Image (cartoon, rainbow, N blue to C red):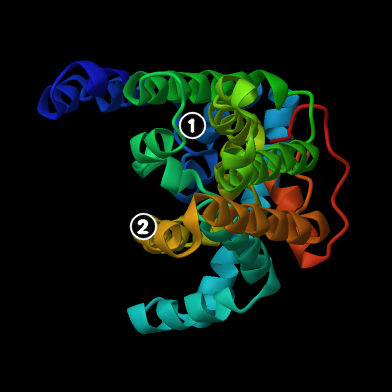
Amino acid sequence: MFLGAMVPWNTVMLINIATPVLSVIILLFMKESPSWLLTQGRKDDALTALMFYREDKEDASLELERILKNIKALEKEREATGSSILSQLTSKMRRMREATFWKPFLILNMMLNIGLEWAGFPALAFYMHTILEETSIPVDEYWAAGFISLYRALVTLSLSFILVKVPRRVMYLSSGILVATALFIQGAYALLGSYVPEEYIYISSWIPLFSILLGYTGFGLGYGPITFILQGEILPSDMRSFGSGLLGVLDNVFLFAAVKMVPILLYSFGTGGTFFLYGCVCLGNLTICFFCMPETKGLSLEDIEDYYRGVVPEKKTKKNSV
């Protein structure tokens, strides 16, 4: 956003190449997935990887044995279903009907494709300048968009320090309330802003900017990041790649629809009605998540899978949690 306010778009793209390059460099220092290493018969490397992530040999050894147990169970299941492409596809379709997959998958779909994509964030991301211009904030909309994006990034970074102490579920629901509140404030100002007395117009003109910052506070503190964190936690290990890929495909479809609907919604309901609609969607998502979203803090990936199987989890050690 800042670069877009200062230089042409093609220069911005060249500068932004640094981001994926940095990601590749960081990934070079990461260890492979212990589960994948065990499927390749590399037990020593898997233990080294677990030590890298857990930093405790006893906990790493115990978790290694649990992962091995799960892998052996999956191998027996594959032997029973066959190794052909058709049999594997049939097995995958049958696996999708099991509660250990479709329950967390539906929750993630609600959180990502409804709760996130239809909570106004695509509208703000793709139509930030238009929305800021229509709300007549008392600052340049291009620089305001840059500062809003910077604020969102800083709040998201702070999540890594907060999640260590705060449960996922509490953080997600609390941050979601902030998002819903921000959406309703934005909608109310758009509908009632013209009735503000003249002497308070300048002060009230900051309300849209405040509501956007409040919404991004909720997004950064958990409403956005926790949705993606849970993809690596609550999907079963043997379906995690498939489930995440399917979620990604559906997310692009919902994102495309949400972005394309913004002009139609603004024309049909106005800015106020559109943000009230987004607020209602956000509240609906939070209501469903209140009853269905599991708490994953302090649980290992195997414990989470046992939760959806209806199995009582084994006694956990102090560090083998996600």
Q: Which residue is mark 1?
A: 45
Q: Element under label 2?
A: helix
Residue 127 lies, in percent from the top left, at 36, 42
Question: Does residue 189 show up?
Answer: no
Q: Is residue 42 positioned above or below 140 on the image?
A: below
Q: Quadrant of residue 3?
A: top left
* The disc label shown at residue 4, or none: none
Q: Is residue 306 left or right of residue 40?
A: right
Residue 235 lies, in percent from the top left, at 60, 56
> Furthest residue to the front?
198
Q: Tell me the amino acid under the disc marked 2.
A: Pro
Q: Residue at x 63, y 59 (%)?
A: 281
Q: Is residue 189 left or right of residue 39?
A: right
Looking at the rendered image, the quarter that the C terminus falls into is top right
- Label located before the other in sequence (1 or 2): 1
Q: Residue at x 56, y 75 (%)?
A: 96
Q: Element under label 1?
A: helix
Q: Is residue 82 positioned above or below 271 on the image?
A: below
Mark nearest the camera among 1 and 2 is 2
Residue 204 lies, in percent from the top left, at 61, 26
Q: Is residue 208 left or right of residue 318?
A: left
* The disc label shown at residue 263, or none: 2
Residue 33 lies, in percent from the top left, at 49, 39
Q: Quadrant of residue 280?
A: bottom right
Q: CA distance from mark 1 to mark 2?
A: 53 Å
Looking at the rendered image, the quarter that the N terminus falls into is top left
Q: Residue at x 69, y 43 (%)?
A: 176
Local packing at callout 1 (Cα closer than 10 Å; few below 14, some 14-19, many 20+) is some
Comparing 167 with 78, the one in front is 167
Q: Tell me the amino acid under the disc marked 1.
A: Asp
